[in-house]
Image: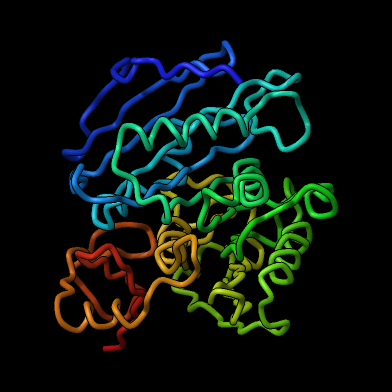
Amino acid sequence: MRLLFTALACLFSVSVFGQQTLNDSLLVDGIYRHFITYIPSTYQQSQATPLVFNFHGRTSSAQAQMWYGDFRNIADTANFILVHPQGLLDNTGVTHWNIGQSTVDDIGFINALYQYVLSNYNIDIEKVYSTGMSNGGNFSYLLACSMSDKFAAIASVTGSMWPHLIQVTCNPSHPTPVLEIHGTSDLIVPYNSALDAIEYWRNYNNCDLNPITTSIPDINTEDNSVVEHIVYDNGDNGVTTELFKITNGGHTWPGTNFPNGVTNYDINASLEIWKFFSKYDINGTVNEVSSITNHNINKQVVKRIDALGREVNHTTNQILFYIYDDGSVEKKFIVE
């Protein structure tokens, strides 16, 4: 594969909330591949920083996903870099990520993009993660199979694994924490197909066969949906395989500010994904003893956010996400 890193970093640069958003391009095999990088204001070149890839769905775009499945507010406090890659057109003329349905070399693109980001920023290579919506979630599963040596964990929203990936081509190199968020009324990617992906990773990770299931409080009774958190625990290296089951949920990103169809607001998918990612590096569970010690001695709350991602001051009788200065997140429900 021929690769040229191009100096197009400033085709488009704006400041959002004091942070930096860059529209960049790479020339990969003669094709300019585009992506949007979000750098939080807390980023320091002297400090190794986690990296999250956020992939759009079929027919969508990097720009749309940056807003629809928005992690920027979380990145600002948790201090991680976000990259939103742009897919190419398939043979029907719509944007996509190739999981076996076209000839586009998207794995080659992400390999090149990974190297580009590492060459320009101080990245903690043990804390690189992938997430995405729909086809972007499918592609995150493919990365867990094909670029396992680079990704610590993946999360999918309304995505799944194609049968050929499960049966033939998935070849991970380490136990991989996997989170799926999926609605039972999804008409684009059926809920049962997501269960096949969960079963694969539960077995590969050697997790418990019987899950721990927790009902999430129905704090928004007008969204026509409820949530269960299903956790297959005790996997190798301490990893888990997890599912948020959105009963009656559609093909949507829970907690988004841009609802389209039945969208759940009892959870915020972006917050849940970062909470999941932050528990792991590529070797498995992050040292929990150290985290607890830091929490008791040094941790300070920097922001409280509700399920819609809004900063709030009233802290009782609602689910809130407490974001700390070390980047960790806790969910709390305080009854007055």
The vertical placement of 207 against 324, above or below, is: below
Quarter occupied by the C terminus: bottom left
**Measured from the top left, where is residue 92 in percent x and y?**
75, 20
Instruction: Tell me what residue is drawn at x 69 percent, y 71 percent.
Output: 202
Q: Seen in the image, is 327 located left or right of residue 103?
A: left
The vertical placement of 306 against 157, above or below, is: below
Q: Seen in the image, is 133 located left or right of residue 66?
A: right
Q: Toward the viewer: 150 or 239?
A: 150
Can you tell which quarter of the image residue 133 is in? Answer: top right
Q: Seen in the image, is 219 located left or right of residue 94?
A: left
Number of on-image labels: 0
Q: How is the image coloured?
A: rainbow
Quarter occupied by the N terminus: top right
Q: Toward the viewer: 5 or 180?
A: 5
**Measured from the top left, where is residue 305 in percent x and y?**
29, 63
**Measured from the top left, where is residue 309 in percent x and y?**
34, 57
| Residue furthest to the bottom | 336
Q: Toward the viewer: 233 or 126?
A: 126
Instruction: Tell me what residue is drawn at x 68 percent, y 82 percent.
Output: 208
Instruction: Tell me what residue is drawn at x 20 percent, y 31 percent.
Output: 15
